[in-house]
Image (spheres, rainbow, N blue to C red):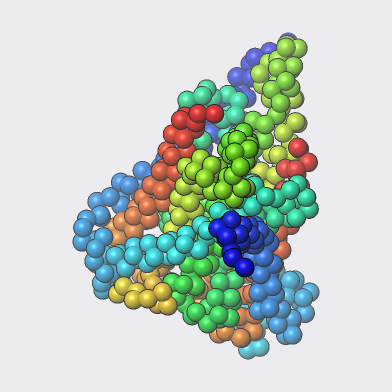
Amino acid sequence: MKKNPYRTQNIAFFFLFLATLLIVVPVGLIVVIIIQKGLPAINWQFLSDIPRHGMRAGGIFPAIIGTVYLVTGAIIFALPIGLLAAIYLSEYSKDNLLNRVIKLAIVNLAGVPSVVYGLFGLALFVIFFKFGASILSGSLTLGIMILPIIITTSREALESVPQSFREVSLSLGASKWQTIRHVVLPNAIPGILTGTILGLGRAAGETAPILFTVAAFYLPQLPASIFDQAMALPYHLYVISTQVPNVDEKIRYGTAFVLLALVLFMNLVAIIIRTKFRKKKKW
Amino acid sequence: MWITVKDMRKFKEFIIEKLILICGIASIFFVVLIFLFLLKEGFSVFNTVSPFNFLFGKSWYPISEPPQLGILPLILGSLLVTLGAAIISIPIGVGCAIYIAEVVPGKIKEILKAGIELLAAIPSVVLGFIGMVTLVPLVKNVFHLPTGLTALSGSIMLAFMAMPTIVSIAEDALYSIPKTYKEGALALGATHWQTIWRVMLPAASSGILAAIMLGIGRVIGETMAVMMITGNAAVIPDSILAPVRTLTATIAAEMGEAVVGSEHYFALFAVGIVLFVISFIINVTADLCLHKRQ
């Protein structure tokens, strides 16, 4: 009997569909489980109180604040450098060896394991610069880690501004920098914003880079300066799920819920900005 | 001599353009800086142990006296977990990429892609936590083990971290094949599946290879989830159902207790060098694969 190619096709497509289900269903389950078990734990006291009784009761306020500080610090460091680097790659660099090496370096920076960033931050910021385990060390480490995300997305945003915009501006007598500052950048802002938010989300969720550079196991007070240690949400989740015995399940799920909600919310915002921008594009 | 407004502007632009150049090469600077600082802190370990004995020594007892600093159990732990994750994630990831790129219609395609992006965004410590409370008891019960903290649990969880990378890069690779290839095959009477299997997959092969490599790179470098669910036993694993400890988990778990300047501390940085070199090789090779296509 001759093989029917359409039957083969149906079988193949069925397996492709199955593969997709195998990814989508567990992801959905993960999110549903965390919402279902974490949401009931959320109340004002949980969000605004310090951890009590060896983290077995109370809230997670210092961890939330610590994460906010770290993420802010990381973006203050990474956004200017990342944006200028993106401007260099999209507006100034020529197609030469240097350009190739820079792109390779960015790819590598994106691929360095997060725990290796932790080691690097420990060696450079904590020990060599003597910043100690502090918000400053942690922010700088996270900042370098999210640099590739910001450079790549900003560069794409800058490059998607049509060449004719630049030509018109230059032909009117504007200098190259004026053209970039007043024509290219304003048109690339949604894309740059997307990259920044994605970077924020990544920095908020990472644990390994802050393990030895900033994270405090248990610190029931708010940091007073950038040279203080701080608690952070992802590290707190790690601590209460593996290092402290007999923590109420509700607190664990609640912490996981807050962290996941924070990160997914930022990613959702980034996705929405990008989609809106694509639809509105005039060129 | 008067400084005119125009001179001021020129000077300002000169400064800004130099700043842009400096930031442009900052990435190179940081990669070199990371490598140098790992070397600076980690190289001293070779005063106590030869590179060969470090890489192939069978026992890791960093705080015994004298310390035994062989990372073979850790390398094998990483390899075992990675191999397991690759076996699970490659067929599923590539399959899903083909489905998204070729089979599914427009609207659902966008939703699926956003879903995959969200999976990539879930922090690894959250995945580790979920693995601990759902997957670990499951593995324990299904295989009747004393503990569910095994290499297998780690492989399954890490497969989910590799999939978003594999799916999005492989989908890109399939999408960027010239439309004429597909149209040509269809016009010759091939079915859609025959076109995918015989024309599109071979044409996208280098991109798909890069996707797989970057996915595996993500798995090797993953730290938190793997530390939480693989059991952390620094012995040479004899089966996928045994607890293992990976290179990354060793650094994360032990650096907090290592005394700065001790052999243990140097050894953990040397493990960092090994990880850095592995990720460097993977990323450069994957990048070459992606560029070959263009």
Q: Nearer the viewer, residue A229 or A88?
A: A88
- Residue at image x 60%, y 29%? B101
Picture coordinates of residue A209 (x, y %)?
A: 52, 66
Picture coordinates of residue B153 (x, y %)?
A: 53, 54
Quarter of the picture containing the C terminus of chain B is top right
Image side of residue B161 versus residue A7, left or right: left
Picture coordinates of residue A246 (x, y %)?
A: 32, 67
From what the image shows, is residue B282 above or below residue A77? above
- Residue at image x 36%, y 50%? A261
Q: Nearer the viewer, residue A224 or B80?
A: A224
Image side of residue A18 versus residue A230, left or right: right
Quarter of the picture containing the N terminus of chain B is bottom right
- Residue at image x 75%, y 31%? B203
Q: Nearer the viewer, residue B75 or A35?
A: A35
Pick out the residue farthest to the front.
B1
> Can residue B230 be seen?
no
Tell me where residue A172 sits by quadrant: top right
Tell me where residue B201 sits by quadrant: top right
Q: Nearer the viewer, residue A108 or A1?
A: A108
> Can residue B204 be seen?
yes
Pick out the residue farthest to the bottom.
B65
Image side of residue B167 versus residue A233, left or right: right
From what the image shows, is residue A65 above or below residue B89? below
- Residue at image x 72%, y 12%? B187
Picture coordinates of residue B199 (x, y %)?
A: 74, 25
